[in-house]
Amino acid sequence: MSTLQHKIDFAVVLRVKNANPNGDPLNGNRPRTDYGGLGEITDVCLKRKLRDRLQEAGKTIFVQSDDRKLDGETSLRNRAESATNGIGKDAFKKTANKDATAKLACAKWFDVRAFGQVFAFASGADAGGVSIPIRGPVTIQSAFSKEAVSITSTQITKSVSGEGDGTKRGADTMGMKHRVDSGVYVTYGSINPQLAERTGFNDYDATAIKAVLPRLFENDASSARPDGSMEVLTVVWWQHNCKSGQYSSAKVHGSLNVAADGTISFTDLDGLAPEVINGF
């Protein structure tokens, strides 16, 4: 299949209710906010969820989370150099052809040809500090809430002994849990055909991204994000009629108007109609 023939822009409108969508480890794991009080979900967090949903859909993923590993590899380097699950050690020797290695990696792993990857973990006599950067065609921005969010913090305790002989059982303080009471967030993304040519990303791959976006929070429940607390309301998909795009991504994204309750409307762009997909 040929590489992507049309530029694509997209947006995801999502609702958070009584959940911590993306905790900040440098701030006691409180939900991330900007200086204006708007809630934030980082692009790294969103790509993690995309990778997980794509992996569940049967795609081969390079950056697998530890609790979802399918191949038993203990590190990214081991996965990359594996003769069974990767592309072999020879691909990362200092004498290896970097373009050939990048091509093999893109063909092997969906997330590499979609988001890109830097293979910079090589070392030893044969490697010589090899670094192989791959720039992917799919980009996604951090999500921000439409209004400042209210954060509730709750002290949690334990009532069992974590160690010792069991004679000391007190409701000892464990820490704090934090949640966003309610908020509507929006994120935007794009898929660039010129970069797709370099990684082999094609129309079928774009369709796979489109299919998982409405299901972004399926199988993602945790104590911080109980089932039903994170919901995709709407996915908006713009497919241009050419590789360069009929309009800039900034103008396309700016044509979407999202109200604080999650309802959407559009500023008309002549010749570029949005496809609106409801969340599941």
Image (cartoon, grey):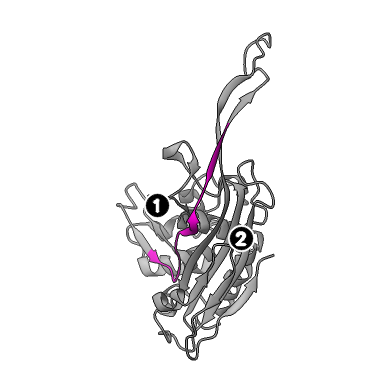
Find the residue positioned furthest to the left. 128
Pointer 1 local density, CA inside 10 Å: few below 14, some 14–19, many at least 20: few
Towards the viewer: 100 or 272: 272
Per the image, label 1 sits on a secondary structure element best described as loop
The residue under the point 49% across, 57% down is 147
- Which span is picked out in magenta? 134-154
Towards the viewer: 37 or 118: 37
**Circle nearer the N terminus (1, 2):** 1
Towards the viewer: 132 or 23: 23
Q: Is residue 171 above or below residue 200?
A: above
Q: Amino acid at mark 1?
A: Gly
Identify the residue position indicated by label 1 in the image.
Answer: 36
Residue 142 image position (x, y, % from top left): 45, 59
Q: Is residue 239 above or below residue 280?
A: below
Identify the residue position indicated by label 2 in the image.
Answer: 216
- Classify the position of the C terminus by image quarter: bottom right
- Classify the position of the N terminus by image quarter: bottom right
Q: CA distance from mark 1 to mark 2?
A: 26 Å
**Label annotation for residue 72:** none
Per the image, label 2 sits on a secondary structure element best described as loop
Q: Amino acid at mark 2?
A: Leu
Residue 93 image position (x, y, % from top left): 37, 57
Q: Quadrant of residue 118?
A: bottom left
Q: In this figure, what is the number of numbered marks?
A: 2
In the rendered structure, does residue 135 fall within the stretch colored magenta? Answer: yes
Towards the viewer: 157 or 148: 148
The residue under the point 41% across, 84% down is 247
From the viewer's perspective, is 68 left or right of 62?
Answer: right
Pointer 2 local density, CA inside 10 Å: few below 14, some 14–19, many at least 20: many
Q: Nearer the viewer's eye, disc 1 or disc 2? A: 1
Tag 1–tag 2 contact (CB < 8 Å): no
Residue 105 image position (x, y, % from top left): 47, 64
